[in-house]
Amino acid sequence: MQFIQFFVAIRSPRRIAACLCVLAALGISASGQTAGGWTHKSTPAKIDKQILIFPDSVVAEQWPHTLKLVNPPQNLKLLNPGQCIRIGIVATGDDRDSLLEKTQLSFHVEFAGQAQDHALAPLAGTKQIKPEGGDFVLQSLAAANVEAPPLSMASLGASADNWCAPDDARDGTATIDAEIESPAGSQKQTRVKIQIESLETGGKRSFRNEEEFEKFTMDFHYQPNPARLYPELLFFCADQKISSNRSEVLIQAAFLGAALKADAIAAKDFMARIAARNECPQGLGMMALLMGGYNVDLLLDTMSVEDRQAFKEHSELPDPYDFGSPAEAPMHFDMLWGMFTASGQFASIKKIASALAWRPDWDDYVKARKSSHPPKAWTPSLGRALAYSAAGWSMNSFLHTDPLAADYIDFLIASPDTPDAIKTELKGLLTNPAFQRQGDK
């Protein structure tokens, strides 16, 4: 199942009732507006004692492409060797952002008999956090041209330092203690523990069914677990129906390639594992490594002359960022979505959004279809029209189901670097008939 198709299959749009529940939870009344805007209950600012643990990439790569108001990152459940994390603290109440700006954080990590201290330092950045259902509220109000209320009641601050699991880490548990210094004084945070899973252990954990497999791939940018990329490859290859489909193979190569590109330690382990395989696991594994920018010459040298030649004939990989052929653009969209679910990278969504500039081709197609001489032959303009529709449809689907994608779309709409024509299309993702399919709600 292709990434876009899968997201539509699991799509579960929130109802208007969810919007009202969020507003009620925030103490906001649609009928209780004042001349100055929405009213809300005033509460003093404070920092919660619970800490969050999330990937370093959230601060280093994702936050630069989001607005001040974002969906929160997921609390990590486990780490593999070499993975790096940040520590987050949450503030609530009025002037919470100002409180976080004046707060410093230190933390102490113990793992495998080793201790590491991270000195008191100002936070690396802060974001206001959307409540559950916040995206639906904002999108619905924007579609109705209604001014949005101040939805956020919490803000998240990220530690200046990160901590990385040792490259040779074995199975175990890391203990994290944090302390803050704020205008309110010192405060010890609640101790947390996180599981560390070795590449060897993760590489043995097979997938029980397709549902678990799909959840792993779709959630990877929130809960990265590169140790299981090899079992993921084996599960995919075991299904001959999809593993013999060129399109499915390219999407899988894009997903694995993006995940491995972000983790050289896991890529080295992955390469060693596929060296002992043949057929699909080895061939697709090598394609993924090529997509990730790795050299596979050592693996080619271990193959027979016939197998080496066969791989070279079938391993030519399209550039997913090249939309030169409109007919192939939808396939490139699927590859880019695969790369996004693997890494959470902004570039994939930005590139897909660029196809929304083909709106004039769609308008020409609609006019021609309603005329007495509808189009009967393929043309580049027709290809661009259908690609425009596919791009908007896929972005609409991810807007409903992936919080990070929703944040990126908000950023694109607000960015001065986004062409006005594309901003208009992004604002119409929910309402544009060109982005709907039969059965969509």
Image (cartoon, helix red, strand yellow):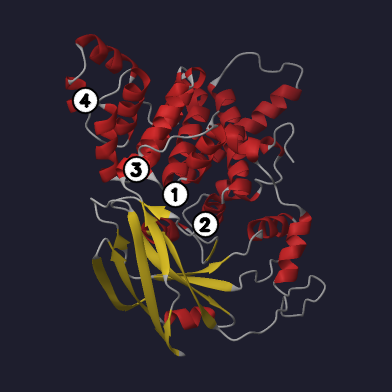
What's under tag 3, amino acid-wise?
Thr
- Mark 4 vs 2, N-terminal side: 4
Residue 23 x, y percent position in the rendering: 73, 68
Residue 112: tell me if it is visible.
yes
Q: Residues within 10 Å of mark 1 (few under 14, many from 20)?
A: many
Residue at the spot x=72%, y=56% of the render?
140
- Mark 1 vs 4, N-terminal side: 4
Residue holding disc 1: 346
What's under tag 4, amino acid-wise?
Leu
Residue 125 x, y percent position in the rendering: 41, 70
Residue holding disc 4: 299
Q: Are marks 1 and 2 in contact (CB under 8 Å)?
A: yes
- Mark 3 vs 1, N-terminal side: 3
Residue holding disc 3: 201
Q: Is residue 45 left or right of residue 79?
A: right
Task: Tell which residue pokes out farthest to the right in this image.
Answer: 31
- For the residue pair 188 and 376, the one nearer the viewer reads as 188
The C terminus sits in image quarter: top right
SS at mark 4 in the image: helix
Q: Are marks 3 and 1 in contact (CB under 8 Å)?
A: no
Please state which of the two labelled residues, at mark 3 or mark 4, is closer to the viewer: 3
What's under tag 2, amino acid-wise?
Phe
Residue at the spot x=66%, y=47% of the render?
428
Q: Are marks 1 and 4 in contact (CB under 8 Å)?
A: no
Q: Residues within 10 Å of mark 2 (few under 14, many from 20)?
A: many
Residue holding disc 2: 411
